[in-house]
Image (cartoon, grey):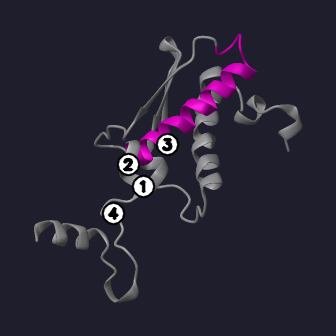
Amino acid sequence: MADKAAARGTQRDRHGRGIRQPLLSNLFRNGGRAKSFDQIVAGACDYLQASWPEELADLKWQVLDAPTLGKDAKAVRRWAVKREEMTIVIYRLPIERLGHPRRTDALHERMHIEEYVFTAVGNLLGKDPWELVPEKYRP
């Protein structure tokens, strides 16, 4: 009887709505948003290192959830630069939650994250972020 109940639970089709979905969505499997955010930052940094091999040979990057806020903070930083260590720090939560309210798809989300990576690396090198982009893509 127990076997029958267990088998029935896996084939359940309540009121013709189909089999129930897993409790957790794919968003939370394999690291979820944080992991994909890290992959986008790593991909942008790898691209910049390949484009600027001499200037960015020692580039290191970190992804942290959020910056520490002081008492007098008027804005939340999206990135930081450690010039002496040749490191950029990208803050995930401010970029994801305080960014563009109408990012509708994965491409726009990726472009939004890469914008901050390019800005941070540009600041690290003392260049405008658009100078880091290959000439064929410049406005």
* Of pointers 3 and 2, the one earlier in the residue sequence: 2
Q: Amino acid at mark 2?
A: Arg
The residue identified by callout 3 is 36
Residue extent of the magenta highlight: 31-56
Image position, residue 57 (x, y; %): 63, 11
Secondary structure of the residue carrying numbered label 1: helix
Q: Is residue 31 visible?
A: yes
Residue 29 bears which disc, if any?
2
Question: Please, what is the three-letter code of the amino acid marked with disc 1?
Answer: Asn
* Residue at mark 4: 22
> Which residue is at a point 64% across and 47% down the rendered structure image?
111
Marks 2/1 in contact by CB < 8 Å: the verdict is yes
Q: Amino acid at mark 3?
A: Ser
Q: Is residue 77 visible?
A: no
For the residues labelled 1 and 4, the Cα–Cα distance comes to 9 Å
- Residue, x 43% and y 48% (percent of image)? 33
Q: Quadrant of residue 103?
A: bottom right
Determine the CA span between mark 4 and mark 3.
21 Å
Numbered disc 4: secondary structure = loop
Q: Residues within 10 Å of mark 1 (few under 14, many from 20)?
A: few
> In screen coordinates, is 76 left or right of 103?
left
Q: Residue at x 53, y 15 (%)?
A: 86
Residue 79 horizontal/vertical position (percent):
49, 36
Q: CA distance from mark 2 to mark 4?
A: 11 Å
